[in-house]
Image: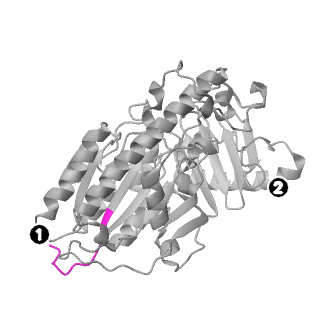
Amino acid sequence: MIEMEDTRPNILLLFTDQQRFDTIRAAGSRFGAKTPNMDALVSAGMHFRNAYCTAPVCSPSRSTIMTGQQPVEAGMPGNLYAETSPALSPTIPTLGHHLRRAGYETVYHGKWHLGSHLRECGFDVGEECSHDASTVMMAARYWRDRDWKVYDRPFFQVVSLFDPHDLYFFDPDKADPHHRRTWDNLKRTPEEYPTAVRNKQVAWSEERWSALIRFYVERIEKVDRDLGVLLDELNCSGFFPNTWILFFSDHGDMAGEHNLPFKGSYLYEGVTRIPLTIVPPQTRFAGNAFHKVRIPEVRRGFADGLCSLLDIAPTVLHLAGVEQPVEMSGHSLLPVVTGEDPDRQHDFIFASWDNPAIQMIRSAEGWKYILYATGEEELYHLFHDSSENENRASDPTCAGIRKQLRSRLREHLQAHGRKFATQFAEALS
């Protein structure tokens, strides 16, 4: 049992579903949504500008968040109950298991989408719920009830909100001229795209696109209001001074880029790049005096280093004082926040899609290579072509970087994705 002098912090993972990296006003929004509560998190912490998911859909990315492993390693390369993706096995250690063993009370409220029962996956308290109003209420009640009790251990809690995922229910007849598409990657012809992308493109009118973007903005603003209620309840329950907050999303959305709606079988920036902010405990006049924590010196602002959802689990374990297991290939982001290693980043990060099989590698130098099991390829230099307009896979001047990325991707698949290594053997030969 953890003794009362335990000075380890509470840890809160607070995340949304299907939120693009460029939807927060304080971090450079392209959508004009009002996001005062997300802005407050960005201002209070370290915001990572180049954070990526490991898959452009819910279940595989969430398996990474919970296990610190690539989706294929966690047994969930596709969405839940797809032919290749049964429920997350309770035999695979999750953050719930690790933190419970370390003496934390483990708590989960909100969307789960991994199949197995929360308690089998290491959580002492919680309920799977895809209704955000209920999720907010359950999380707030947990804090309020806990505030009146003396606990002998800190909590690790996940609050997983569903929106802006409800984007799918937009009304195509509600056009709005104030929400036009502004992307500069709309002029490429379908023939310029790989087959898997071409099959998902749609020829909607600009009025219909405006209705989609208008609704997306509404859902972002709604989830921001829900965040505001959660943060107010966390503060008024006395937990701001002893709780680290990690705020992020599981994946993004295309929102009309490349004439693509929603998420799916493509690995462009809109769907793979996500918001990620780490906020340290915040001093308030009053607080949970019986649980004082050690708060290191921290930096606030923006970090440009390349990072991934693979880094969430190592960061949580670092905060809790738990040794990172060898099966986790990410690294803690805490040294970036504290300034101990402000330039820490990955040399390469990876993402995948299961059916049809697609792989992505993105380098710290800004190169992004996408390979389809069909052998089709895309290569972009994001520092000079952030909209992914110019596919340079067949450019002879890029032959060297293409070869390097293919070699590194091959090594990655052999080490972290045997299933994919087999699927891509011919394409990478």
Describe residue 342's horizontal placement relative to residue 370 as left or right.
left
Position of the N terminus by quadrant: bottom left
Which residue sits furthest right?
A: 396
Which residue sits furthest top?
A: 173
Asked if residue 157 lies in the magenta stretch, the reply is no
Describe residue 283's horizontal placement relative to residue 151 as left or right.
right
- Please give the name of the residue rendered at 44% of the width and 37% of the height, measured from the top-left corner: 219
Q: Foreground mark, 2 or 1?
A: 1
Q: Earlier in the sequence, mark 2 or mark 1?
A: 1
Q: Position of residue 8 (x, y in %)?
A: 28, 75
Q: Main secondary structure of the magenta part?
A: loop
Q: Position of residue 90 (x, y in %)?
A: 28, 48
Helix, strand or loop for disc 1? loop
Frontmost residue, 267 versus 10: 10
Asked if residue 6 lies in the magenta stretch, the reply is yes
Which numbered disc covers residue 5?
A: none
Give the amino acid type for the residue marked by disc 2 in the picture: Gly
Which numbered disc covers residue 150?
A: 1
Write down the residue under mark 2: 400
Q: Quadrant of residue 164?
A: top left
Describe residue 290's horizontal placement relative to residue 380 as left or right.
left
Q: Position of residue 331 (x, y in %)?
A: 49, 66
Residue 383 vertical placement versus 301 (above, below): above
Position of the C terminus by quadrant: top right
Which residue sits furthest left?
A: 149
Magenta extent: 1-11
